[in-house]
Amino acid sequence: MHRLCLIPLAAALLLVPACATQSEKSGFPASQALSIDKLSGSWVAVTMPGVPVPEPSAIDSPRNGPPTIEFSQSRAAGFSGVNRFAADFTLNATGPGGLRFGPIISTKMAGPADRMALEAAFVKALADTSTARIEGDDLILLTNQTEILRLRRQP
């Protein structure tokens, strides 16, 4: 009789480590959970490691500008450097700060080599994003806790 009672107790004890808090899984405190209210609006890319990003003030046409993204409900869309793109996204699925983009669709125009390289790096950063955090007016996209893209909120 006592052995039968110990089996469920042992099973429950084995599951306790698997029930880590969401913050332990993502590395972010619960206070950094993302919400659509925090993400809503337009953002412009300001830095991507290893890739020059044009400054918005130095452009003569939006087509020559930096990549942009706009979040609304569960959809993100914007300009990736040459083409327009869109993707669904999920928030906090892996814990506070979790951000994952679904398959990215885009127009298929060609452009100058430097713009195509910028676009490829931007789309790859979105696809590789696992978490994000907001610092002031900046949205920082990360993979494995490493910054891969920094965007700035637009007025």
Image (cartoon, rainbow, N blue to C red):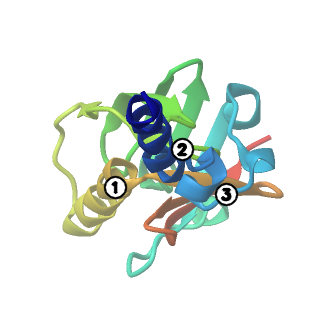
Q: Residues within 10 Å of mark 3 (few under 14, many from 20)?
A: some
Q: Nearer the viewer, mark 1 or mark 3?
A: 3
- Total marks shown come to 3
Amino acid residing under circle 1: Asp
Q: CA distance from mark 1 to mark 2?
A: 26 Å
Q: Is residue 70 visible?
A: yes
Q: CA distance from mark 1 to mark 3?
A: 18 Å
Query: Is the residue marked by circle 2 packed among few (<14), some (14-19), or many (20+) residues within 10 Å?
Result: few
In this rendering, position of residue 34 left or right of residue 147: right
Location of residue 35 in the rendering, given as x and y in whole percent from the top left corner = 70, 31
Q: Quadrant of residue 52?
A: bottom left
Q: Residue at x 16, y 47 (%)?
A: 110
Q: Amino acid at mark 2?
A: Cys
Among the two numbered marks 3 and 2 on one chain, the one whose residue lies closer to the N terminus: 2
Residue 26 percent coordinates (x, y): 55, 55
Few, some or many residues within 10 Å of mark 1 (<14, 14–19, 20+): some
Element carrying mark 2: helix
> In front: mark 1 or mark 2?
2
Looking at the image, tell me whether mark 1 or mark 2 is earlier in sequence order: 2
Q: Secondary structure at mark 1?
A: helix
Tell whether 30 sits left or right of 25: right
Image quadrant in which you'd find residue 154: top right
Q: Helix, strand, or loop for circle 3? A: loop
Number of the label disc, if any, that sits on residue 19: 2
In this figure, which residue is indicated by the disc labeled 1?
128
Q: 92 or 45: which is nearer to us? A: 92
- Residue occupying the point 59% across, 21% down: 72
Location of residue 57 (image quadrant): bottom right
Residue 28 numbered mark, or none: 3
**Looking at the image, which is closer to me, 137 or 78?**
137
In the displayed orientation, state which residue is furthest to the top.
Answer: 73
